[in-house]
Image: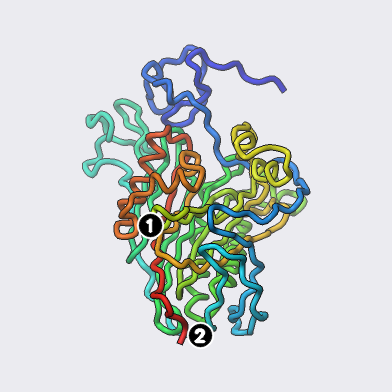
Amino acid sequence: MSQKPKPSHGLAACPGCAEPLESGDRFCGACGYDLSAVPAAETGPDRPTVAIGTPVNWPDAPPREVGSLSTMTQHPGDLPGTDSGGHDLPADPAPAPGGDFELAAPDPRAAVRVDDPAPAPVPAPAAHADGLCVACRAGRVDTDGYCENCGHAQPRERDHMERELGGLAAVSDRGLRHHRNEDAFAVSATTLPDGSPATIAVVCDGVSSATRPDEASAAAAEAAGAALLAALPRGTHPQQAMHEAIVAASEAVNSLAEKAADGEPHRNAPACTIVGSVVADGLLVVGWVGDSRAYWVPDDRAAPAARLTEDDSWAAQMVAAGLMSEAEAYADERAHAITGWLGADAYELDPHTVAFKPDRSGVVVVCTDGLWNYAEGPEDMARVVPPDAAERPLHGARVLVGHALDGGGHDNITVALVPFAAPPQGAGPA
């Protein structure tokens, strides 16, 4: 199939609303964007999350060490505790080798209530309160969300969302190149059976090549957050709870798929990635499918930061197979093709979960690639996370979103900041 000729202005789609453009267009016919004023930075590469076309069998990645942190992916039953039905899980695993973190297994608890659900994220207004266009401040906004005077598309409900809850916060933004926000998040807090607090953050990134990616990410975030809120107060081990939450998120996304005539889901069924974290009882648990990531940034910036997740992506598989260096792989145009996702057309569901017990305080950065594209390495992320992020998580999340926007904002941007307070030395379960 031949490709469409590239328009003379260098843009295939409008930077404001992503509508297709023709050669010679000076303004976008959908939103009125002035194409003659497009700065050079807006013509850079746009690398949304897309699913890889065919399954590939790759060798397992070798154990990875980043600084003094050793990571080890666990299976959900590898740590003692109870499952959602109250049944015991297997015995202790061997501890992870050395490093600032070690695998840990807090004691199972008895059941306790879930805290009242917190209010929904605060969205940006769809238009100015007086009904006037946010751009020209003269025209009225029609029922389709466009100004009747200048044609400017008004901000959608999900274009920018912020949420602060207790000691954690999240911010999601459409970015500068996409016509809608296909990311979603859920942050919440509850208590363990002994009354100690637990904080939850889930971030999802819709797969742009699939249908209704915005619905997929919203359904996954909501389902995973609800599953964690239900499981943790019952005494379910946080790692088991994370595994079950990802399964619940997958089922929620699968339910969005429309059936074809033969009863099978369409190939481009709604899909998304997911990454989540739970901080509870001195334990940090991370779970994910896809290429959304979690980073550890210690309060003491003299200590090493670390990436806590391994991407399900073409680039990561190339590095794991020893076929490319990390720099070469992530510079390739195929880098962001993902090999794992939630959706009815996923090859198989393979939730990754890992547990750590940090020996110092810090903050967990849970984010989509719209952020980490501009701060990929752990040291890069540590440099852009404000020093007071643990005390001011909403401010810190805003700073990180701003960093991505300043870098070009080529994708939707979502980040949750989850502070981790290390327990006093010698403290442990009673």
Number of callouts in the render? 2
Identified by mark 2, the residue type is Arg
For this view, does 9 lie left or right of residue 253?
A: left
Identified by mark 1, the residue type is Asp
> Quadrant where the C terminus lies?
bottom left
Q: Position of residue 224 (x, y in %)?
A: 53, 64
For this view, does 397 lie left or right of residue 410?
A: left
Residue with the mark numbered 1: 300
Q: Nearer the viewer, mark 2 or mark 1?
A: 1
For this view, does 128 lie left or right of residue 260?
A: left
Q: Position of residue 300 (x, y in %)?
A: 38, 57
Q: CA distance from mark 2 to mark 1?
A: 32 Å
Q: Classify 187 as above or below 231.
A: above
Residue with the mark numbered 2: 109
Image point 44% across, 55% down: which residue?
303
Judging from the image, what secondary structure is the residue with disc 1 in?
loop
* Residue 162 visible to an observer of this rendering: yes
First of labels 2, 1 by sequence position: 2
Q: How is the image coloured?
A: rainbow
Q: Are marks 2 and 1 in contact (CB under 8 Å)?
A: no
Image point 50% across, 76% down: which residue?
232
> Quadrant where the N terminus lies?
top right
Residue 193 falls in image quadrant = bottom left
Judging from the image, what secondary structure is the residue with disc 2 in?
loop
Q: Classify 297 as above or below 130.
A: below
Image point 51% across, 60% down: which residue?
276
Depth order, front residue of 55/249: 55
Image point 65% across, 45% down: which residue?
316
The numbered dot on residue 414 is none
